[in-house]
Image: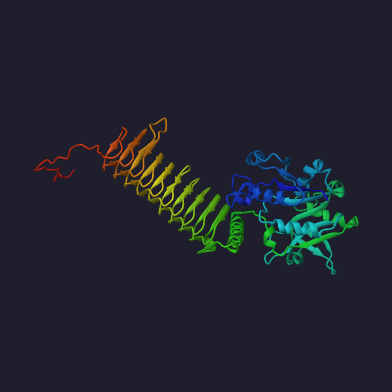
C-alpha cells in the first residue's frame, strides 16, 4: 500500500532554551530532523515525505535547501499535533496510509518502523507504545480488561490513577488515509492546553468501528523525544552506543567504546585500534592495522595501512599514506597528502601540502601550499611563507633536501634536489641542486660588553 510520511517539526522547544528550532539541535553532528528524514527515506516503497514546520520555519527549510524532495507545510500557530497534520492534509490525497513521525524523535531504527508497518493491517489505526520505568511527560495508554486500546490520555489531563500507568504513547501513528479528513475535522480543543490532539483519533476510530492496533516497541528508548539538553545528551549517548556496538561487531577494536564519538561514516580494515576520546566526522576510511591515539579528531580523511596517528592530532580532508606517522599534537589541514612512511611530528601544521615518501617534519613547523619531494628532512621551526597579504604562493622542494632549523622559505620559491639549507636562513630565491645555501649575517662578539643594570633609586 502507498504510504506518505508526515514529520511534525513545528515546535519551538522552549525547554531547550535555545534560539535555534528544536529540530535543528545537533545529534552526532547533524540536526535531529536529518536523522528522522534519513530513516523515513530508507523505508521500503520510496514514500513521499512531508515536513510540517512552524517556529523558525525559514531557518529549518534553509537547513535542508539541498533536499528538493521534501514537501513542506507551514503551521502558522502551534495548536497541537492534530492541527499540524491538518496542514499537510491537502497533499495526502493519493496515499492509502499516512505514517506520522516527529522531528525530535531521532533514534527510531528503520527495522523497527518496518515491523510496525508490516504488523498493522490495512484500514486499522496503528500506534507505537512502550513501557517506561519513568513515564513522566508522556500520554498514558488506556486499555480494557481484555487488552484493547481504548484511548490515550495526555499526562496533564490524567487522573491520579491514570498517572500510575507505565505504558505510554510514543507518538508514532499509522492512519488510514480514507478516514483522516473526517477524523481531523472532528477534533476539538477540549483539553487543558486548548490544542487539537492527534491522539483523539484513537477515540474516533473506536466509535467508527475501526480497530486500533497498539504496537509495543521492544526498546521504547528508540522513540523517546528530545525536549531539553539533558534528553539531548541521553539521545547522543544512546545513539553513540548503538553505532559503536555495530562497529565492534564488524571488527573494530576500541579501548573504551563509551568514549568514541561517531558523527559520520567510518569504514575500516583489519585490526584497527582506537584509543579513548577519538571523534570521527564526515566520511573516514581506515586501512588495515591503523592505530589512532587518544583525543584524535578525523574529519573526511583517508588513512592507509599501518598508519599510526598519535594523540591529540586533528586531521581534516587529508590523505595519509601507508606506514606514515602523524602527531602527537599535529594539525593536518584540508588538501594535505602525506606520503608513505612520512613523519609529521608534534606541533606541525600542514595545509595543501604534498609530503613525499619517507620525508619528515618532526617538530614545530608550518608547511602550507607546498610540494615536498621524497626523503626530505624539514628541521624544527621551518616555515613556508606562503601568504603575501593578498595571494597564496607555492613552495617546491625536490627530493633528498635538508632544510635546517628555523628556516623561512618565502614563496614563490623552489629548492633543487639534494640541496642543503643551513639553519636560520631566510630563502627568497631559487636554491640550486646540491650544495649548501646559507642566508646569515656574520657572527661577531663585542668584548667587555656591559649590559643595562637596574637603578637602585625607587621609582
Outermost residue, top side: 390
Q: Where is 181 relative to 126, above or below? A: above
The residue positioned 83% from the left and 47% from the top of the image is 184
Residue 272 horizontal/vertical position (percent): 51, 60
Figure quadrant of residue 445: top left
Q: How is the image coloured?
A: rainbow
Evaluate whether residue 157 shows in this view: no
Give left or right: position of 447 versus 416. Answer: left
**Can the viewer see residue 353 in this picture?**
yes
- Count of picture labels: 0
The correct choice, above or below, for 447 with respect to 125 in the image is above
**What percent of the width, then of the height, locates residue 278?**
50, 56
Left or right of 31? Residue 7 is right
Which is more toward the observer, 295 or 436?
436
- The image quadrant that residue 89 belongs to is top right
Which residue occupies the extreme bottom position in the image? 145
Q: Residue at x 71, y 48 (%)?
A: 41
Q: Is residue 112 above or below residue 82?
A: below
Residue 260: image x %, image y %? 53, 59
Q: Position of residue 438 (x, y in %)?
A: 24, 38
- Which residue is the extreme one toward the right? 209
User: The C terminus is located in which quarter?
Assistant: top left
**Residue nearer the viewer, 258 or 317:** 317
Amino acid at each position: 500500500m502507498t504510504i506518505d510520511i508526515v514529520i511534525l517539526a513545528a515546535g519551538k522547544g522552549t525547554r531547550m532554551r535555545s534560539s535555534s528550532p528544536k529540530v535543528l539541535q545537533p545529534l552526532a553532528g547533524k540536526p535531529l530532523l536529518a536523522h528522522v528524514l534519513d530513516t523515513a527515506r530508507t523505508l521500503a516503497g520510496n514514500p513521499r515525505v512531508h515536513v510540517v514546520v512552524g517556529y523558525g520555519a525559514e531557518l529549518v527549510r534553509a537547513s535542508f535547501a539541498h533536499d528538493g524532495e521534501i514537501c513542506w507545510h507551514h503551521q502558522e500557530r502551534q495548536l497541537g499535533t492534530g492541527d499540524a497534520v491538518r496542514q499537510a492534509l491537502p497533499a495526502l490525497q493519493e496515499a492509502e496510509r499516512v505514517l506520522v513521525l516527529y522531528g525530535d524523535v531521532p533514534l527510531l531504527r528503520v527495522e523497527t518502523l518496518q515491523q510496525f508497518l508490516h504488523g498493522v493491517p490495512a484500514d486499522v489505526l496503528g500506534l507505537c507504545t512502550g513501557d517506561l520505568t519513568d513515564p513522566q511527560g508522556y500520554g498514558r495508554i488506556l486499555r480494557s480488561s481484555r487488552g484493547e486500546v481504548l484511548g490515550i490520555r495526555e499526562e496533564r489531563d490524567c487522573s491520579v490513577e491514570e498517572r500510575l500507568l507505565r505504558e505510554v504513547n510514543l507518538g508514532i501513528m499509522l492512519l488510514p488515509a480514507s478516514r483522516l479528513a473526517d477524523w481531523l475535522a472532528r477534533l476539538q480543543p477540549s483539553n487543558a492546553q486548548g490544542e487539537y490532539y492527534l491522539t483523539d483519533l484513537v477515540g474516533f476510530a473506536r466509535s467508527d468501528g475501526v480497530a486500533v492496533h497498539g504496537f509495543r516497541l521492544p526498546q521504547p528508548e528508540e522513540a523517546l523525544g528530545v525536549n531539553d539538553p539533558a534528553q539531548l545528551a541521553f539521545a547522543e549517548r544512546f545513539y553513540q552506543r548503538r553505532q559503536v556496538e555495530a562497529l565492534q561487531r564488524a571488527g573494530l577494536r576500541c579501548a573504551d567504546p563509551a568514549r568514541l564519538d561517531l558523527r559520520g561514516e567510518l569504514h575500516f580494515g583489519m585490526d584497527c585500534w582506537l584509543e579513548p576520546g577519538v571523534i570521527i566526522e564526515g566520511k573516514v576510511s581506515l586501512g588495515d592495522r591503523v592505530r589512532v591515539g587518544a583525543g584524535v579528531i578525523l574529519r573526511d580523511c583517508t588513512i592507509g595501512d599501518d598508519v599510526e596517528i598519535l594523540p591529540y592530532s586533528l586531521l581534516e580532508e587529508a590523505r595519509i599514506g601507508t606506514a606514515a606517522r602523524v602527531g602527537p599534537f599535529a594539525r593536518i589541514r584540508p588538501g594535505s597528502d602525506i606520503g608513505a612512511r612520512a613523519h609529521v611530528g608534534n606541533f606541525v601544521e600542514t595545509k595543501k601540502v604534498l609530503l613525499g615518501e619517507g620525508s619528515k617534519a618532526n617538530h614545530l613547523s608550518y608547511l602550507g601550499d607546498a610540494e615536498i619531494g621524497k626523503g626530505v628532512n624539514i628541521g624544527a621551526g621551518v616555515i613556508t611563507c606562503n601568504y603575501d597579504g593578498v595571494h597564496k604562493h607555492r613552495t617546491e622542494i625536490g627530493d633528498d633536501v635538508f632544510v635546517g632549523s628555523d628556516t623561512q622559505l618565502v614563496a614563490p620559491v623552489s629548492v633543487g634536489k639534494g640541496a642543503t639549507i643551513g639553519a636560520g636562513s631566510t630563502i627568497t630565491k631559487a636554491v640550486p641542486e646540491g650544495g649548501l645555501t646559507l642566508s646569515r649575517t656574520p657572527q661577531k662578539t663585542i668584548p667587555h660588553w656591559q649590559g643595562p643594570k637596574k637603578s637602585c633609586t625607587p621609582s
